[in-house]
Amino acid sequence: MKRKILYGLGLGICLVSIFFGWKIYQNSTRTIIPIDDMLEIRLEKKDNKLNLSGKIDMGAFERISNWGAVQKEGVIYVYIMKTKAIIQSKNLDIDLNDVIISDSNEKPSKVYLVSGSEIEVKFDDDPRKDYIDVMNYEDKTLIFTF
């Protein structure tokens, strides 16, 4: 009986370690998706909602991990990130109204999709200080005009 408890406890610790190790690995592989890999991306406005949808060219074992939209003055900048995963995910379907961060009361006039390695600002000495700056884009493409 004691052997079964130790075996179960060891297995539980192993599974928890694998889970957290995988999450740390995924976080270290998270990157901004280049605009060239974004296929058929379209933004539709329906009933005051902005819906971004399309397909993204992903490598094996990659999925869309997170996205964001930041409004600077009258322009919304959207970025999409990917990470390593066991199950591949290529389809994108986002309600931008849920993720827009705005520092302005202005109504937006344009929506740009942005990418580039400098959007994610990283600090080697303290990863807790990492942040996203959409104005550091290398590429942008207009996807919607109001």
Image: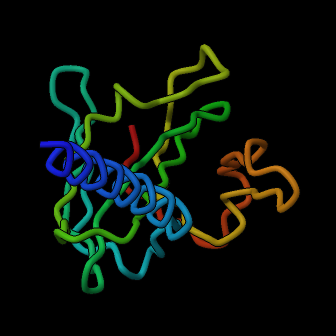
Q: Position of residue 106 (x, y in %)?
A: 59, 19
The quadrant of the image that shows the N terminus is top left
> Outermost residue, top direction?
105
Residue depicted at 19% across the width and 66% down the height = 89
What is the total number of numbered labels drawn onto the structure image? Answer: 0
- Front residue of 6/100: it is 6
Q: On screen, 140 above or below 46?
A: below
> Outermost residue, bottom direction?
60
Its colouring scheme is rainbow
Q: On screen, 61 above or below 1?
A: below
Residue depicted at 67% across the width and 59% down the height = 119
- Front residue of 38/22: it is 22
The image quadrant of residue 60 is bottom left
The quadrant of the image that shows the C terminus is top left
Residue depicted at 66% across the width and 48% down the height = 132
Q: Position of residue 11 (x, y in %)?
A: 25, 55
Residue depicted at 42% across the width and 52% down the height = 20
Q: Position of residue 141 (x, y in %)?
A: 48, 65
- Front residue of 83/76: it is 83
Q: Is residue 104 left or right of residue 30?
A: right
Q: Is residue 104 left or right of residue 82?
A: right
> Outermost residue, right direction?
125
